Image (cartoon, grey):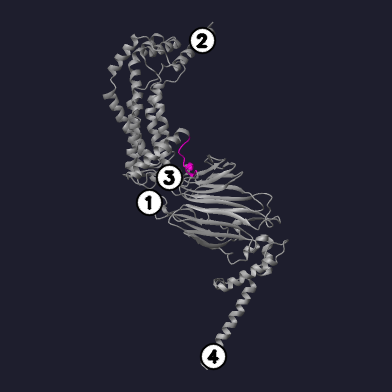
Amino acid sequence: MEDKKLDLNSIIGILLIGVIFLWMMYQNKPSKEAIAAEKAKKEMLAKEEKTAKAQSVAAPALVAGDSTQLAQLQKTLGGFAYSATLPSAKDTVTTIENDFVVLKIANKGGYIVEATLKKFTKFEKNSGQLVSLIKDNNADLNIRLQTSDNRVLETKNLYFEPTLTKVGNDQVLSMKLKAGANDFLEYKYVLKPNDYMVGFDVRSQGLSKVLNTAKPLDLQWNMKTYRSEKSIAYEDRFTEIRYKYEGDKNNYVGNGKDKEETPDKVDYIAFKQHFFTSILLTDTPFEKSSLKSNKLAIDTEKDTIFIKDLKANVPLAFRNGEVDYKMNWYFGPTDYDTLKKYDKGMEKIVPLGWGIFGWINRFIFIPLFGFLSSTLGLSLGIAIIFFTIIIKVGMSPITYKSFLSQAKMKVLRPDIAELGEKYKKDPMKKQQETMKLYSKAGVNPMAGCIPALIQIPFMYASFQFFPSAFELRQKSFLWADDLSSFDSVYKLPFHIPLYGDHISLFPILAAIAIFFYMKMTSGDQQMAAPQQEGMPDMTKMMKMMIYVSPIMMLIFFNSYGAGLSLYNFISNLITIGIMFVIKNYIVDSDKIHAQIQENKLKEPKKPGKFQQRLQEAMEQAEAQKKTKKK
């Protein structure tokens, strides 16, 4: 009797489950259990396909459930109401990852809602917070859909259906926004092992009757960049939109508030942060694009989460009624070598300077520093010291020529002073006689300037190289915890305008070195020609610069990377040493004086082109002066 009772209960239970199941299918509101059941899924898909075939051309939306529910959705979503009736129409995400990145793609919008780099931490090395370029709704990707029935839909508000597969070792995620079983807009993500690059294809199928194809779709990519580094001001300076356009041209959207550029034929758009970047690349160049940048870190004491608000609007053109773009995402470090390996010109987003400054960085600084730090395996601080020594020793012949010219000018000072006294009432005559003296003595007044000018590109290149050197990030040396950021040794209880709220030691050492270097050389640095009436006194200006330069170093370098300050400190120490050796052991002032006196007895050398032009200009000026007096 008990067994029969159990059988009856089982039968009743099965019947109830069947009734509930049929009712759920009729209402097209599947539960989690029904979705999980493979049989239920197959029956639902079969029903959708059957309905799709019966759908008329005039009304492309396909019925996949309750007709009342679908009718309500069609009022707002038109042909894409179908996507809202699918089981995927819920707020879930699909995760794909490799050893480098973790990407989470949402059903709603079909775009990446989280991009985390697994090998890097924020702010400090041991912070425990991984760098997330995208997280907590700081970024979105949206396509504005102009439908054939005059609707404007936003893909970021619509639900995509995910399908995750593997092709070899690659993870392939297809996200489809459906207007029918076989009509859809697809985002396809392909993530390879050990790669920062993600394949990203955007294509449509069967939407020529659903969308208005008369004009391109509008793809919108927006991001508020998170702060990832210790210095907000420093990160703000190097956070910007960079882009490649019209073949091989590169440019950027300026810093500050509400900056905009509208380039044509864009190959990639980089939302570049200081040491990390998000890049959208395309095989089919975007036509007229709109790129906007807005500064968010106005007050670095309060605005500590976001740095910039970056926006990109690009057109996706239709071809034969459909869109089909082969694109890529890059989420990774702004590292020159890493970006260059992809052979897509992305390394040009690293700001190494234009013209000769960029050449020095690409062909001298980067290879040399890479050799010292990677090949020889030196610690980054020691590598900077050896790097500086090699650069300064390599430029020592130029330093020698510059100092030799200063020494010659120093020997001639008594003669120049005598001419100044003799022709003090006739400045033009004084200038002419001084030039004759230079020619007779075999001294080129420009010889000391040219070597100094040659060193300027190397100095400027260093200001671009060290802030861009990704390998310095979170690498310590002596008291500096991070060579890519400031080396604070004391936190001030207040904020000093331009200087900051901390004291960095390497800028102080660099400022002291600059002071002694300028003090050492200022006595030998004089104007190539005597002072003219109405012209500023360069001697006084040089004396002033002895004190101004160190102060500028203290102010502007206090929040700069310690690596750059260390380079300047070592560079000036080495220069002081080289100048000391040249002055005391190489250049013989008595010998130079004897040589100049001997040159005076010889026939004066033919003046160079510059001296000739200068002499002619002075003679013309003198003639005009006499004419005016008459």
Residue 237 % position (x, y): 47, 42
Eye-nearest disc, 2 or 3: 3
Residue 276 % position (x, y): 46, 48
Measure the C-alpha gap from mark 2 to mark 3. 61 Å
Q: Amino acid at mark 3?
A: Asp
Residue 503 seen in the figure:
no
Q: Amino acid at mark 1?
A: Lys
Q: Compare marks 2 and 1 and give the one earlier in the sequence.
A: 1
Residue 454 % position (x, y): 41, 28
Outermost front residue: 168
* Residue 352 falls within the magenta-colored stretch: yes
Residue matched to label 3: 337
Corner quadrant of residue 38:
bottom right
Does residue 441 lie above or below 218 as drawn?
above
Residue matched to label 4: 5
Q: Compare marks 4 and 1 and give the one earlier in the sequence.
A: 4
Eye-nearest disc, 4 or 1: 4
**What is the secondary structure assignment of the residue under circle 4?**
helix
Q: In the displayed structure, does residue 264 sit left or right of residue 275?
A: right
Circle number at residue 125? 1
* Residue 555 falls within the magenta-colored stretch: no
**What is the secondary structure assignment of the residue under circle 3?**
helix
Q: Nearer the viewer, residue 371 or 481?
A: 371
Corner quadrant of residue 292:
top right
Q: Nearer the viewer, residue 102 or 293?
A: 102
Circle number at residue 625? 2
Report the span colored magenta.
345-354
Residue 372 % position (x, y): 34, 41
Eye-nearest disc, 2 or 1: 1
